[in-house]
Amino acid sequence: MKSAIKKIFFPLHEFLKGHKSISYLQKLEQSQWRSRDRLYMLQSERLIELINHAYINVPYYRNLFNSLKIKPDSFKKHEDLNRLPFLSKDLIRENFEMLKSDKAAALMKSNTGGSTGSPLIFYLGKRRISADIAAKLRATRWWGVDIGDPEIVIWGSPVELKKQDIVRNIRDRLFRTRLLSAFDMSEEKIYKYVSIIRKYKPKHIFGYPSSIYLLAKFARQSNMKLHDIGVKVIFCTAERLYDHQRELILDVFGAPVANGYGGRDAGFIAHECPHCSMHITAESIIVEIVDHEGNPLPAGYSGEIVITHLDSHDFPFIRYKTGDVGALSEDTCSCGRGLPILKNIEGRTTDFIITPDGKIMHGLSLVYVLRELEGIKEFKIIQEKPDCFIINIVKDSIFKTENETLIKDGFKKRIGTDIKIIFNYLPEIKAESSGKFRYVVSKVQHPYN
């Protein structure tokens, strides 16, 4: 079955969708063993191609280059990126249509999960999607997992969950994927999930570290065994993976935990190899580290992570500020790959919500209520008590008072009708003392803490 999926069904699926992920993957399997200098040269060549394309075909960059009196043919290496301003979420919102390539076709609209309290909508082209799929597949192969191996995905994005129709179910069954919702992590649901995992016997599990950790903790407390079902690796992404989470997950499943870093907007930036290095997908992504004033920082110094996605031709992400903090490393990895290394990654955190009836919900379930509404620039959700929520909002000129009703209805649909919601309208929402932005904060005692 695995061979048929790998050699026939998955390549056919990608071909029908217009993706070139298989050919991309074949190239990545070879290029990862290049020296860092050769990968740097490849990045520079691909950057020159992207810059020229953007100038000719993307109105925003054509206007930007002309206003700065910069010629695209003056770019020779990726240090030349310093001559361009950063791309921020606000700039993308303000220049949304101008950032689309004149040659773009069959674009897919996507958005972030609102992890900064300020969701972003953007477009993805087939080239960009193919590159990200290939990067993920290469990283899973590092751990002995390949196309066709059975997997469990613990996820919460409506982009995925709303697609559980007949076609999606057939596709998931064909590719041996089982999706479990991270939006409902009640004791009853977790028990069911553990039973499904034991029966399904996946080779790998993919999802939020907080959700997988909660599942592992419940299994440990309930004496439900998961270490004997043949899981090879647990892939954690979308949130910061903490050491205590890694340790418990490893112990309960008897399988290593691999950290992944990236996002819908920035792409598949880096992934952990079995030798504990977070390798950057250098063939597609240039990573810069800058200080609070935007100055580049040398390896070893922590600052904001800025990326340029070299396959984002249809909707370019050039010097895009991620809002995350990390550092580049000059170390070489004992795995032998020349891919550069990213370290000290400070992602964003998500709390769980405890409903009045004791159900545990992933905080993202509430984020999606607000992120779909126009006029909300930033937000932060604070759960004071099981039945009391404070929502801080920074609104813009198109904010509608009807949004309050829509938010209340969305919360009550997910949590229950007997809740109190207080709205605070602020000029800005400040980060935590740690420098990170927690867009969902629950002050309610967690039953498994």
Image (cartoon, grey):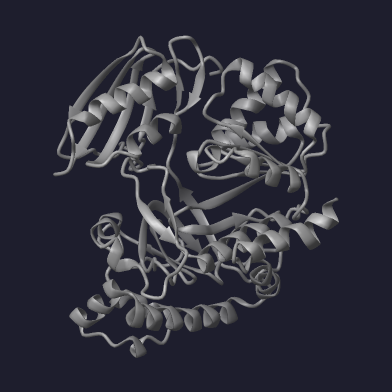
Q: Which of the two residues, 195 or 78, is positioned nearer the viewer here?
A: 195
Q: Residue at x 18, y 39 (%)?
A: 399
Residue 334 pos. (x, y %): 70, 63
Is residue 368 left or right of 157 when viewed as pictured?
left
Q: Is residue 123 visible?
A: yes
Residue 31 pos. (x, y %): 65, 75
Residue 142 pos. (x, y %): 72, 58
Q: Residue at x 65, y 53 (%)?
A: 276
- Vertical placement of residue 121 versus 70, above or below: above
Number of numbered callouts drawn: 0
Q: Which of the two residues, 291 or 33, is positioned nearer the viewer here?
A: 33
Is residue 173 left or right of 258 when viewed as pictured?
right
- Vertical placement of residue 377 versus 8, above or below: above
Q: Which of the two residues, 330 or 417, is positioned nearer the viewer here?
A: 417
- Vertical placement of residue 122 versus 398, above or below: below
Name the residue furthest bottom. 73
Residue 409 pos. (x, y %): 33, 22
Q: Residue at x 74, y 33 (%)?
A: 253
Is residue 234 left or right of 199 when viewed as pictured?
left
Is residue 71 left or right of 232 when viewed as pictured?
left
Q: Is residue 295 visible?
A: no
